Amino acid sequence: MSTWLITGCSTGLGRDLARAVLEHGDQVVVTARDAARVQDLADTFPETALAVALDVTDAAQVAAAVRAAEERFGAVDVLVNNAGYGYRAAVEEGEDDAVAQLFATNFFGAVAMTKAVLPGMRARRSGTVVNISSIGAQISPAGSGYYAASKAALEAVSASLVKEVQPLGIAVVVVEPGGFRTDFAGRSLTQAAEPIADYAETAGRRRKEHDTVHGTQPGDPAKAAAAIIAAVEADEPPTLLVLGQDALNGYRAVLDAQRAQLDAWEGTSASTGYDA
């Protein structure tokens, strides 16, 4: 039986994953900024679930959540950095305070959680860190530059982390979901307060008042949860798990475009060395 600590369990993928892991027979520390919103999971699974209040931007709460997990279940075997939210704005529209808060949650909060569990994982020479990213980190839609940047930063630090901890028996899995039918594009999505008219046909098209995607996303969160559990339990967990046909198509399109541009400019790229 493994112990999972999952951030951001009040709604969406985090909640579906927490329930799936509990039904799978493992132990879960289910967290949310308001623990009352996840207490029902602890009540349904009183022997294997613990509800804990956690704001990943609060260092004291990060430490307290890991301590509570260790006191109740002995160790954290799997950390899932799921807490996060979206923010839409043209780059020029981005509000400094809003962008700083976005990175504090989506990037620095995940890093803080990871640093909090790594000492125990290193001591046991085992464990898994799952970082929930987004296909947005690859496709970078207009109007989502800051959100994509926060997830790209998480992916970059994950790529270095895997090289550091894999020799110690610790796995790192980056999950890149496409569109899933959660609250991400609804209540959890924020945006710049003052749109600029010149961006109406680019970033403006993705503002909440013009977005008709919410509620019709192709991805099933329950199937995403099952896929994440399968990846964590694999003999060799993937370092990247793309979820959804839309995400697969988007990722391949980015790779194809990058390869085409790399090849087109190969001569220039290779011409910058000292002459022999």
Image (tube, grey):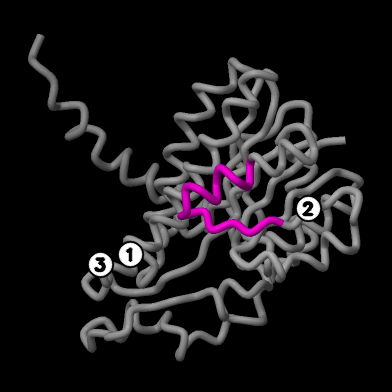
Marks 1 and 3: in contact by CB < 8 Å? yes
User: Residue visible at 49% across and 30% down?
Assistant: 161
Give, as a three-letter code, the residue at label 3: Asp
Secondary structure beneath dot 1 equals: helix
Foreground pick, 91 / 259: 91
Foreground pick, 113 / 85: 113
Give, as a three-letter code, the residue at label 2: Leu
Give, as a three-letter code, the residue at label 1: Val
Secondary structure beneath dot 3 equals: helix
Q: Which mark is residue 50?
A: 2
State which region is magenta.
Answer: 52-66
Q: Which mark is residue 99?
A: 1
Q: Which residue was labeled with disc 3?
A: 96
Gap in angstroms between the C-alphas marked 2 and 3: 36 Å
User: What percent of the width, then of the height, locates residue 37?
Assistant: 71, 70
Foreground pick, 135 / 81: 81
Up/down of 75 relative to 83, above or below: above
Q: Earlier in the sequence, mark 2 or mark 3?
A: 2
Q: Earlier in the sequence, mark 2 or mark 1?
A: 2
